[in-house]
């Protein structure tokens, strides 16, 4: 989707070529590759999607494109770190200033300090 400057997954019907699915590849979406021929993700709460491929090379090609958009390594099977709810709650409970440190302004002549 170059005209919109975004990458999307487009799924078309094999028989008619009509568009069945258009899903923007979001940098923050967790995509998972499962069983060598399946890519799954969620677009909204309680709205899960899956692409199933007949052959592994087709799945690998799409998986590599998703990883490229997200800047991830295609050799992993999950594009984002999964945080379970208990860990997420721990982060929410921490005072915001407890983990902040001051860093010097990063400039070329100060790279050793950064």
Image: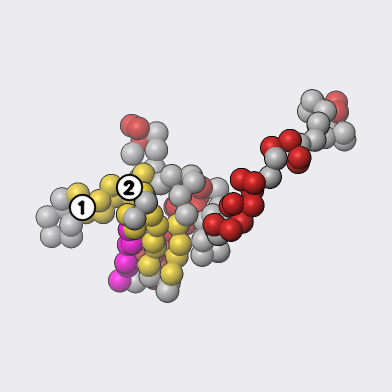
Callout 2 secondary element: strand
Front-most of 88 and 102? 88
Examine the rendering and report whether any part of residue 2 can be seen.
yes
Q: Which residue is mark 2?
A: 23
Q: Quadrant of the N terminus?
A: top left
Give left or right: position of 50 versus 80.
Answer: left
The residue nearer to you, when weighing 29 against 112, is: 29
**Is 51 covered by the magenta stretch?**
yes
Secondary structure of residue under mark 1: strand
Classify residue 33 as left or right of residue 104. left
Horizontal arrangement in the rendering, residue 20 relative to residue 39 (left or right) = left
Name the main secondary structure of what is drawn in magenta. strand
Q: Residue at x 55, y 64 (%)?
A: 75
Membership of 30 in magenta stretch: no
Question: In the rendered image, which quarter is residue 16 located in?
Answer: bottom left
Circles 2, 1 touching at the beta carbon (< 8 Å): no
Task: List x then y, in percent, for residue 71.
Answer: 55, 48
Identify the residue under disc 1: 20
Category of crowding for the residue at label 2, using alpha-carbon neighbours closer than 10 angstroms: few (below 14), some (14–19), many (at least 20)? few
The residue under the point 68% across, 45% down is: 94
In the image, taking residue 73 as reference, residue 99 lies left or right, namely: right
Magenta residues, as a range? 49-54
Residue 73 appears in view? no
């Amino acid at each position: 989707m170059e005209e919109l400057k975004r990458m999307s997954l487009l799924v078309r019907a094999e028989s008619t070529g009509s568009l069945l699915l258009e899903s923007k590849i979001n940098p923050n979406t967790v995509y998972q590759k499962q069983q060598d021929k399946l890519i799954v993700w969620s677009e909204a709460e309680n709205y899960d999607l899956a692409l199933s491929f007949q052959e592994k090379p087709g799945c690998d090609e799409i998986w590599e494109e998703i990883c490229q958009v997200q800047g991830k390594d295609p050799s992993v099977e999950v594009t984002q770190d999964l945080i379970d709810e208990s860990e997420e709650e721990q982060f929410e409970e921490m005072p915001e200033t407890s983990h902040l440190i001051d860093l010097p302004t990063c400039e070329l002549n100060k790279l050793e300090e950064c």
